[in-house]
Image (cartoon, rainbow, N blue to C red):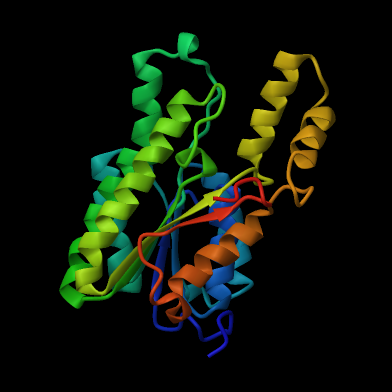
């Protein structure tokens, strides 16, 4: 079966957090076109409404469940998973794409900054995964893809809080993968570098302000630093996530797939 055929994920229910961000949104559209039923969630109701319209142009409305939620909140998280199961059935695939960025140096960080970053980027994903993992174990099937970052593989200047959260996600991915594969559940991560999303644009804007440069100058410098000479698109990350969900990736277990335009070679 072709990897990206309209039937590649038929009969599957893919649950995507952070679907109002660029990577989550593109992933949702890709897997919908691959035959999956799709649950999407995020905190921005306007963006969710727009995503619903986009998905309804790609698949039948009965294959879509949309709910605004803050997955860091236990009650909202539990209700979200319950509603998704009731509407679309067993959650066979989970994509943890929710996350925030930050660029404070160590001397600028407070303990509350670290806690907030870890809560959104790691702890909420961990807790949501626990909500769906038990049924995956019972059915002995499932896929989990965590959206980490190159910052989960090496530190960079002004990235102490963000890198800490993404290193945590990579460590968890690897450890859980060893446990889950005994139940025929695969756990992997994707590690993008710069991706053309609102979050990265915000980082470029902040850097431009701090360096007294234009946004265009900062973006050009970032692009020229990459062997590929361009920033990754959200769709490219979505395609990689979708591939990891397919049966074509059956023996990919506990990996951290880099999408860096050649920025990281090891």
On screen, residue 103 versus residue 232, left or right, reads left
Q: Position of residue 88 (x, y in %)?
A: 35, 72
Extreme residue in the top direction:
107
Q: Residue at x 74, y 36 (%)?
A: 222
Above or below, 251 relative to 266: below
- Which is nearer the eye, 101 or 18? 101
Q: Residue at x 20, y 71 (%)?
A: 182
Extreme residue in the front direction:
266
Which quadrant would residue 214 be assigned to in this image?
Answer: top right
Q: Position of residue 86 (x, y in %)?
A: 28, 68
- Which is nearer the eye, 22 or 192? 192
Q: Position of residue 149 (x, y in %)?
A: 51, 44
On screen, residue 78 versus residue 245, left or right, reads left
Q: Residue at x 40, y 31 (%)?
A: 164
**Residue 142 seen in render:** yes
- Which is nearer the eye, 234 or 69? 234
């Amino acid at each position: 079966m072709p990897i990206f055929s309209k039937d590649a994920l038929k009969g599957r229910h893919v649950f995507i957090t952070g679907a109002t961000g660029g990577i989550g949104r593109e992933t949702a559209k890709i897997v919908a076109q691959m035959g999956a039923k799709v649950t999407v969630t995020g905190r921005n109701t306007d963006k969710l409404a727009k995503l619903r319209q986009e998905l309804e142009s790609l698949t039948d409305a009965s294959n879509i469940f949309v709910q605004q939620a803050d997955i860091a909140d236990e009650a909202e998280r539990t209700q979200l998973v319950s509603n998704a199961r009731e509407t679309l059935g067993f959650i066979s695939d989970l994509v943890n794409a929710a996350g925030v960025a930050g660029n404070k140096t160590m001397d600028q960080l407070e303990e509350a900054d670290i806690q907030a970053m870890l809560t959104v980027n790691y702890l909420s994903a961990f807790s949501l995964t626990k909500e769906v993992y038990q049924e995956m174990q019972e059915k002995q099937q499932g896929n989990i893809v965590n959206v980490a970052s190159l910052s989960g593989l090496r530190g960079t200047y002004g990235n102490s809080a963000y890198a800490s959260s993404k290193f945590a996600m990579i460590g968890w991915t690897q450890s859980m993968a060893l446990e889950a594969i005994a139940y025929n559940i695969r756990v992997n991560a994707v590690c993008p570098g710069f991706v053309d999303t609102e979050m990265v644009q915000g980082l470029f804007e902040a850097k431009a302000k701090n360096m007294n440069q234009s946004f265009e100058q900062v973006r050009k410098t970032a692009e020229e630093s990459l062997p590929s000479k361009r920033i990754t698109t959200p769709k490219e990350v979505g395609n990689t996530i979708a591939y990891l969900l397919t049966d074509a990736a059956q023996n990919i277990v506990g990996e951290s797939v880099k999408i860096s335009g050649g920025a990281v070679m090891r």
